Amino acid sequence: MAPVPITIITGFLGSGKTTLILNLIPQLPHTYRIALLKNEYGDVAIDSQLASSAAISGVQELLNGCICCNLVGQLGDALDSLLRDVGPDRIIIETSGSAFPATLAMEINRLGRETGNYVLDGVVVVIDVENWKGYEDTSYTAKMQQKYTDLIVFNKWELVDERRYDECLDRVGDLEPIANVKSDKGRVDQSLLLGLDSALAKDGDPINGGYSKDKPTHEHSERHETEVEVLSVNLVSEGEKPKSVNIDSLETFLLSAPKDEVYRIKAIMSASHPMASSNGDVDESAGLQPGIATYILNWAFGRWTFTYSDMALPPPISVASATAESAVSNTHETILRMTIVLARGEASKWKSRLEKGGMIEQEDDGGFLMVSRVV
């Protein structure tokens, strides 16, 4: 069984973490099972009750303490309980405002190595732009939350003038380059928040950048388009004989992608052998089935997993943009379908790099690579 991806959402008190989660749920397939592990101070977590009513399959609460220090020993038991009782496709951990995400991420990685049940998909920090100037200057934890993260979500930026937002953006940039995006009143597109896992892959097509059956409204789509750019990559082979992606070239591409330019890479592909994930683990699930198998790639902010899947690759797209010499016909087979989510202004540069070759290619000679911008 593939490990369950875990997404950490952290941020200072009142930054809008729960709102971000509740806005994520409607974007997911109806059959997708989310489990929430919530860390709160106090005896009653009221918004956990709210989250339970929003199509979340199960909730565990760790109260009266911080999950990154005095409650860290309880994390494994809480995750195991969710795994046993809910059987989730994904676990979201929402931390208290004082939690230190680096410690929590290291503990999840340790549990993942020891049990094989979990994998860290990403650490998302929510920043309240309206109040950032105050607590950025006084809270060491607030600054560390920002530094040890994969994606920063700027929330409540609509409530301030452009100068205040620019000041906040400058402070974030002072530490190190980090992927960042503005929320739309607490909403961020799920294709940016979540990586690709087997449940999402079976429900949709990574070429579209999102997997929800219910397409976002025009207003949300327009907002998302101003924040990120998206490339669709298709690699097809000619003939009915199965072909494989060149794993060495693909790994070179993954290692070369700066995480402040490339936010997420998601793909379904055929490969003759598994590639090691970024932590060195190799999924041997396909070992009993010699030959080419299907794998799911999930690259998020410099880390990646490469896992076996029993699903079939989608048929080749009907490519209107293909040249006459390489027009895709029914004699072609899909080798890879990929979505790349990039920072603003990066799509043209990376489209050109991919088209030059050497990054995404067939294991032997041949194959047609098509790269197009979809957002």
Image (cartoon, helix red, strand yellow):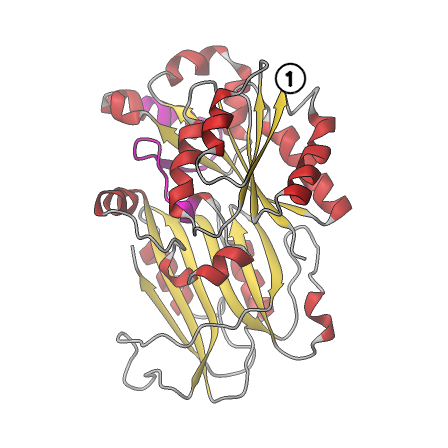
User: What segment is highlighted magenta in the picture?
Assistant: 167-192
Q: Quadrant of residue 54?
A: top left
Total number of numbered discs in the rendering: 1
Question: How would you rate the neighbour count of disc 1 (Cα within 10 Å): few for under 14, some for 14-19, many for 20 or more?
Answer: some
Q: Is residue 125 visible?
A: no
In the rendered view, tell whether residue 354 sits above or below residue 5: below
Q: Is residue 102 left or right of residue 365?
A: right
Residue 243 position in % (x across, y down):
54, 81
Q: Quadrant of residue 152?
A: top left
Q: Residue at x 59, y 69 (%)?
A: 310
In the rendered view, tell whether residue 203 sits above or below residue 187: below
Residue 260 position in % (x across, y down):
44, 43
Instruction: Identify the residue position indicated by label 1 in the image.
Output: 65
Given the current orientation, which residue lies at the most extreme right position? Answer: 114
- Location of the N terminus by quadrant is bottom right
Residue 176 position in % (x across, y down):
48, 33
Q: Is residue 274 visible?
A: yes
Residue 9 vs residue 178, the one in the foreground: 9
Q: Residue at x 58, y 52 (%)?
A: 304
Q: Is residue 330 left or right of residue 44?
A: left
Residue 277 vs residue 205, the one in the foreground: 205
